[in-house]
Amino acid sequence: MSAFIQAHAGNAEWQLALGDCWAQIRFQLKDAPAPNLGWCYLTDHHTKAAGNILEALRDHMPGVHWVGTVGVGVAAEAVEYFDAPGMVLMLAHLPPDSFRLFSGPTPLEPAADGFEAFTALVHADGAGADLPDQLKALAGKTTTGYLFGGLSSARNQPLCFADDVLLGGVSGVAFGPQVPILSRVTQGCQPIGPQRTITRAEGNYLVSLDNARALDCVLEDLGLDGEISDPDLRHELAHTLAGLVATSEDVSAKPGHFGTNTQVRHLLGVGRQSGVLVVAERIAAGMQLAFCRRNAEAARHDLLRITAEVRAQAEAAGGIRGALYISCSGRGGPHFGHPNAEFQMVRKALGEVPLAGFFAGGEIARHHLYGYTGVLTVFTAAT
């Protein structure tokens, strides 16, 4: 697999931003084979121009298939364009039979030429109520069951790209075994109490944990008195989340940390008399739950851990050709203390390899939809 190339610009005028990117690409193409797959990530300052941008990209490079999405932030190398105009492009030359684009109009199905989808990069609109089912079905169409990606976080109009501008749905690109990857999830929350078992739940209503009232359990884990006032209780619960592990998943993780199978969801409400909590996820008896809060220092350590692990494994496999990092829109530099901080950490840990990504409204890994996480995926040398 040839080395990837990338470009990025922050001009508010899309024509000037694209011109800046094209100049960077043209310079790098002198020493690289013609690319056939491209990623385009735009901040929502460029949403209205998305169709024009994609058309211009096709005109510049007619042999390239384009995938991507629009979000509140995008990033490349060690630069984050967050809540500001931003355009990020990455290109690669892959074996022509090693990838397939898919979307609603062109779903991922067995190809007549024998293409086998091992993994898939997924971009999606999070508004669909059946998105979890769509992700499970899509994962089932890959050999490994592994998806990676994220949801559009555009505030004006969620858009995705798969050789066209798409409104809603699920789209992306599937990779065959000729395109090996390594991928990890990094968590952004830390448990503040023990893993508990859900003993009664109805839909989104969490009734009991370990056969005790859900409200009593969260008060215990937060160290709060049962006589806390309603306003103070609402304030505390607004900063508390539920880390869920499905009954079919392995709960194992280091003490005081979440494993990659933990999905974090908000607490939406509480019934003071009934002791019931409302969770932003359908839950069921038998699932594991630990109350948690966002923790920037824990998130920093976990990010450094997974980037070091990925780099070591990639170097053993022949090195990193290119990398995608998709982070939660609630993370980024501001969460880690200063502008560009998150991508600076990833860049420093991986080395000077092409790195692109965006800040998502939800992160995808395997068939799960995460929140407050980062999903790092690197493309390694072909075996």
Image (cartoon, grey):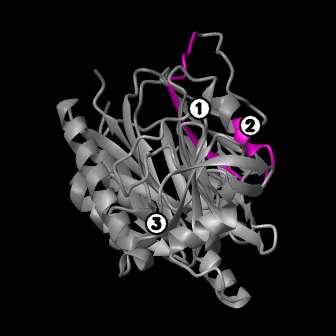
Label 1, label 3: how many angstroms apart (C-alpha)? Answer: 23 Å
Count numbered badges in the picture: 3
Return the residue nearer the eye: 20 or 316. 316
Closer to the chain start, of discs 1 and 2, is: 2
Q: Are discs 2 and 3 less than 8 Å apart at CB?
A: no
Q: Is residue 337 magenta?
A: no
Q: Quadrant for the N terminus, please.
A: top left
The label on residue 133 is: 2
What is the crowding at mark 1: few (fewer than 14 residues within 10 Å), some, or many (at least 20)?
few
Check the image and report above or below for 382 versus 12: above
Residue 210 vertical position relative to residue 132 in the rendered view, above or below: below
Identify which residue, 351 or 255, lies in the foreground. Answer: 255
- Left or right, 271 with reference to 346: right
Circles 1 and 2, Cβ within 8 Å, touching? The answer is no
Q: Residues within 10 Å of mark 2 (few under 14, many from 20)?
A: few
Tag shown at residue 16: none
Highlighted range, magenta: 114-134
Q: Pointer 1: what residue?
A: 248
Distance from label 1 to label 2 (Cα)? 16 Å
What is the x, y in percent for residue 83?
55, 78
Residue at 65 percent across and 42 percent down: it is 162
Residue identified by numbered label 3? 192
